[in-house]
Amino acid sequence: REMGSNRTIVLYPSPGMGHLVSMVELGKFTLNHHPGLAITVLVVNPPYNTAASTAAYMNRISATTPSITFHHLPSPPLDPDSYPSLEALHFELLRLSNPHVHQALHSISLTAGISAFIIDFFCTCALSVATNLGIPTYYFFTSGANGLALFLYLPTLHQSTNKSYKDLDELLHLPDLLPIPPRDMPVPLLERTSPEYAFFLDVATQLAKSSGILVNTFESLEHNILKSISHGKYVPDGPTPPVFSLGPLIASDNGKGGGAAGGTGGGVHECLKWLDMQPSRSVVFLCFGSVGRFPAEQLKEIAIGLERSEQKFLWVVRSPPSEDKTSRFQTPPAPDLDLLLPHGFLDRTKGRGFVVSSWAPQVDVLNHGSVGGFVTHCGWNSVLEAVCAGVPMVGWPLYAEQKLNRLFLVEEMKLALPMDESTEGGFVKAAEIEKRVRGLMDSEEGKVIRETAQAKKEEAKQAMADGGSSTVALAKLVESWRKLE
Ligand code: UDP
């Protein structure tokens, strides 16, 4: 028996592009298999850059999936420039939104039973609100199972040292996990005395108290670690909530109809037309997430490395971070390519390379037959998009938990080669870029990870198909809600 149509699931994503999109995709996946349900998404409008891109995405969903309702919460008054980091800004934004969340849950529950409230980890402050209303609350973890294991273990790790991870030299040993170089820990956790550290430590404690954790991965990608989590190895002092692997949940198209800031406003993007003219798997794609930006000197160095690699490339270039603190979280202006790239670069690489300003339709690009490799910042959505497209990677992490993702992609999943950014204070020289791009596109090593990537693509497809591991996990989750009715 399906649940009655007066039952709803409320999703509460944090506003970043990667967080919102994957959670809405969770809603779509749920509806595909359990059409009797309704989904309400609580939307916090961010006072910065991804607002335009997420709005376009939500409009597309509203037009195609009427069972998903977007409930916009009032925007709390706050000055983005007074926060030291995007994470700090997010916590505050979501903390201030809490009374509105309470109100929204209350008003929704007047007309429909709320079977489950599913929150992003930035929305942890809403956990107690929902619990007080007697609504079962789950986390949707927007990174992989390795990352989840680490998060669950944070309180234990915290007890084991009183130093900041940035000052530690010894590798961190967690049960059943690759040893982690402390500097590969998520950026907001590096400094023990920072507010971000305290916040995430609290998130970790709350995660373990939720009704369950939904994670954007699939069984065969992270089988061993998922088993270790369910055996309770990362929450030594209490029960581990049930974990459901429901991925890979990615947007099926994020480029059409002005899919994002700087989008094309409809029609086929120029870069896809260019890809149409290139040989099969000949092009390396370079793109660094929704907010990744490089200093001007690093952009020049990438250009030199690409030129020397003699490989075909499609490169998304964004303006360097501004010196002006007041525009940190705003959409950067379009890059001045003539100024930023080495003199004559665009002419010399004409035909062999294509530079896109600011934003490319990444999912479409990765799934284009001419693309044979991806240099990525290792944001988890980008990783899953590459896995679904069967494209091997070079991992060049920039922020958040991306170094950790690279570690597992390179050492465990064998889906990526590492970019070595550890010398020169994070600056990567042209020679390293040339070496890695060649390694990816034109070497035995690259061929091996390409074959692994192709195999994973098939496994990802199977996981989401009828009878696949993610579909079965979803059925179990929905069944557990039904029992609570
Ligand atoms: N993206 C895109 N075009 C771009 C840059 C990013 O379509 O030029 C999309 C990408 O496909 C992914 C998301 O933005 O879905 C970025 O999410 P991810 O988790 O990889 O990184 P984040 O932006 O959260 O660091």
Image: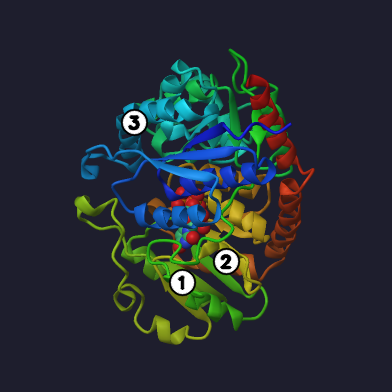
Residue at screen point 55% across, 26% down: 152
Marks 2, 1: nearer the viewer: 1
Residue 30 location in percent, x, y?
Answer: 63, 41
What is the spatial separation of the Cα atoms under label 2 and label 1, in whole angstroms?
14 Å
Q: Which label sits on residue 364?
A: 2
Residue at screen point 21% across, 42% down: 79
Q: Which residue type carries mark 2?
A: Asp
Q: Are marks 2 and 1 in contact (CB under 8 Å)?
A: no
Give the image quarter of residue 74: top left
Residue at screen point 49% across, 21% down: 205
Color theme of the render:
rainbow
Residue 116 location in percent, x, y?
Answer: 55, 28
Estimate how packed mark 1 is, as few (under 14), some (14 to 19) or many (20 or more) residues with alpha carbons within 10 Å: few
Q: Which residue type carries mark 3?
A: His
- Nearer to us in this view, 436 or 401: 401
Q: Which residue is mark 3?
A: 100
What is the spatial separation of the Cα atoms under label 3 and label 2, in whole angstroms?
37 Å
Residue 194 seen from this side = no
**In what quadrant of the picture does the N terminus appear?**
top right
Q: Are marks 3 and 2 in contact (CB under 8 Å)?
A: no
Q: Which residue is mark 1?
A: 266
Q: Which residue type carries mark 1?
A: Gly
Question: Quick one: SS at disc 3?
Answer: helix
- Nearer to us in this view, 427 or 96: 96
